């Protein structure tokens, strides 16, 4: 039993360093540090990008809310006041409008009614 424990102790002592330990080679250690710094910088950039996107979304929502509020205020706005009965509108120039005699309109109306009642 003692020999077995002694053999395990020798094997444990001669084992290579665990992956979590820093390598003893200075070049490899520098590369590991640079890699970790790059990963940290990328994480900071991602967080900054997410924060900026959140700010833009908040501003967009605020602008849309303000536009909707302005629309509601415009709908609530005062309606036109009734016209003063003493103020007369300017007379219309009827010369440029088409005119149809009343008899012609009545005859056309009678023909339309007759055609709509004549069902086949």
Image (cartoon, rainbow, N blue to C red):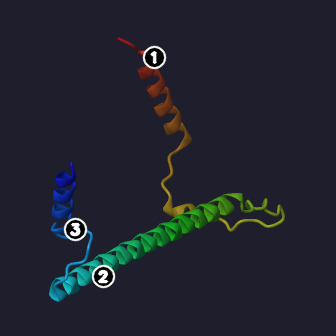
User: At 68% from the left edge and 62% from the top edge, which residue is drawn?
Assistant: 73
- Horizontally, residue 75 falls left or right of residue 64, namely right
Name the residue furthest top: 120
- Residue 92 vs residue 103, the one in the foreground: 92
User: At 44% from the left edge and 74% from the top edge, which residue is drawn?
Assistant: 52
Q: Which residue is mark 1?
A: 117
Foreground mark, 3 or 2, reads 3
Distance between mark 3 and mark 2 Cα atoms = 19 Å
Q: Which residue is mark 2?
A: 37
Q: Is residue 92 visible?
A: no
- Horizontally, residue 1 falls left or right of residue 86, namely left
Mark 1 surroundings within 10 Å by alpha-carbon count, few (fewer than 14), some (14 through 19), many (20 or more):
few
Foreground mark, 1 or 2, reads 2
Q: Earlier in the sequence, mark 3 or mark 2?
A: 3
- Residue 58 vs residue 104, the one in the foreground: 58
Q: Earlier in the sequence, mark 1 or mark 2?
A: 2
Q: Report which quarter residue 82 is drawn in.
A: bottom right
Q: Report which quarter residue 76 is drawn in.
A: bottom right
Name the residue furthest front: 2
Across and down, in percent, residue 64 comes to: 54, 64
């Amino acid at each position: 039993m003692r020999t077995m424990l002694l053999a395990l102790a020798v094997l444990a002592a001669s084992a290579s360093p665990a992956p979590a330990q820093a390598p003893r080679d200075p070049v490899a250690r520098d590369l590991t540090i640079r890699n970790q710094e790059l990963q940290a910088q990328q994480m900071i950039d991602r967080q900054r990008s997410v924060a900026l996107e959140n700010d833009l979304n908040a501003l967009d929502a605020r602008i849309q809310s303000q536009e909707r509020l302005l629309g509601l205020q415009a709908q609530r706005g005062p309606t036109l006041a009734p016209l003063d009965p003493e103020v007369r509108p300017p007379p219309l120039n009827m010369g440029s409008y088409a005119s149809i005699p009343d008899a012609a309109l009545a005859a056309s109306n009678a023909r339309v009614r007759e055609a709509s009642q004549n069902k086949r």
